[in-house]
Amino acid sequence: MTITEESAALLHELWEGMRDQHGEDRTEAQLVDDAIRRVHRGFFGRPPGGGGPDQPTGPFFKWASGRSAEVLLRQVDATTFRLSQPFRYDDGRRRFNVPEDDVTDLASVPRFLTWLVPRYGRHTLAALLHDHLQDDDRVSSEEADLLFRDSMGEIGVPLARRWLMWAAVGLRTEKNRGGWRMVRAVAWVVLFAAAALALSVGLVAGALSGWGPLLTAVGAVAGVVVGALVVSVVWGRLWALGSLTAVGLVFFSLPVLLVLIALGGYLALEWAVERVAVRSPHRNPVLARNL
């Protein structure tokens, strides 16, 4: 086996760095052997019990074998990562290769929603595939969203969670289309978020006033949920997306508002402490986009 001059120079540079920084006395041949093992694990993988994933990953496989896919990332900045090992998706009907160095932010969940859906978890492989498909001309954004939902089911994400996540990415897809679809998506969110907050006030007032008003408020919530299912016909074939989004807004708008208030208060405190306790050249930015 021969290697190029460039690779030989890189190998020697690595050997010198290992020796100078850590006092290691491995030979260049041993470093090559270690590199081959690492590449083999990255592309071919290890079996369960032998260092590979203990849980099956459904239709997600290593790049060059049928072994379960793994996720290894390099952090680029505060919210962006690059994939350090490739993997492939193959459900018997469709096959997609997700290459090394693909850029991702994992699941694109705003900070104020991570209490409900974390940015990583059982859905990570599906989220990485979804990010990759945004740049694949063979698949529309709508098809990518559906594949995201269905592939989550194949790797053990609970039914309610994966459909809720699908509704969220589907709503974003509609907004990004612009025109009437964007107007419909934004108006839908505003309408049902406002209705949810109004109903929340009614529930609190009902709870403080007695059983009669409380039952009335509960009935109003049920009425809004049923109404959302009915008026979702304006979404046409995407009625499931519209109804799920509406129901999600009814149940989660108040918790989200409370989390936003708490996070806003914390950011204000963080900003004040940074200004008072840290000298100007050493201050770290307090970013509202972290919300």
Image: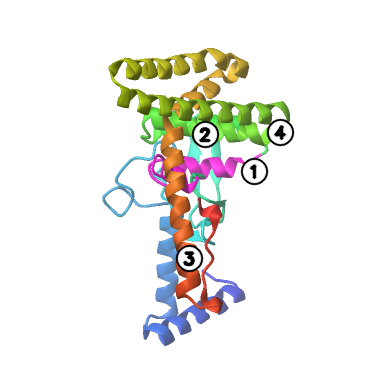
Point out the tag, 4 or 1, that comes first from the N-terminus: 1
Cα separation between marks 1 and 2: 19 Å
Point out the tag, 3 or 2, that comes first from the N-terminus: 2
In the rendered structure, which amino acid carries the disc numbered 2? Ala
Cα separation between marks 4 and 3: 39 Å
- Numbered tag placed on residue 148 in the rendering: none
Please tell me which residue lies in front, 235 or 147: 235
Residue carrying label 1: 135
Residue 122: name its quadrant.
top left
Q: Position of residue 26 (x, y in %)?
A: 38, 80
Question: Does the rendering let one see residue 243?
Answer: yes
Residue at the far right in the pictured view: 179
Element under label 3?
Answer: helix
In the rendered structure, which amino acid carries the disc numbered 3? Ala
Element under label 2?
Answer: helix
Q: Which residues are magenta?
A: 110-136
In the rendered structure, which amino acid carries the disc numbered 4? Gly
Q: Nearer the viewer, mark 1 or mark 2?
A: 2
Residue carrying label 3: 272
Residue at the far front in the pictured view: 209
Q: Residue at x 38, y 19 (%)?
A: 217
Q: Label 1: how many residues lie within 10 Å, few (<14), some (14-19) or many (20+)? A: few
Residue carrying label 2: 168
Please tell me which residue lies in front, 138 or 174: 174
- Numbered tag placed on residue 178 in the rendering: 4
Point out the tag, 3 or 1, that comes first from the N-terminus: 1
Point out the tag, 1 or 2, that comes first from the N-terminus: 1
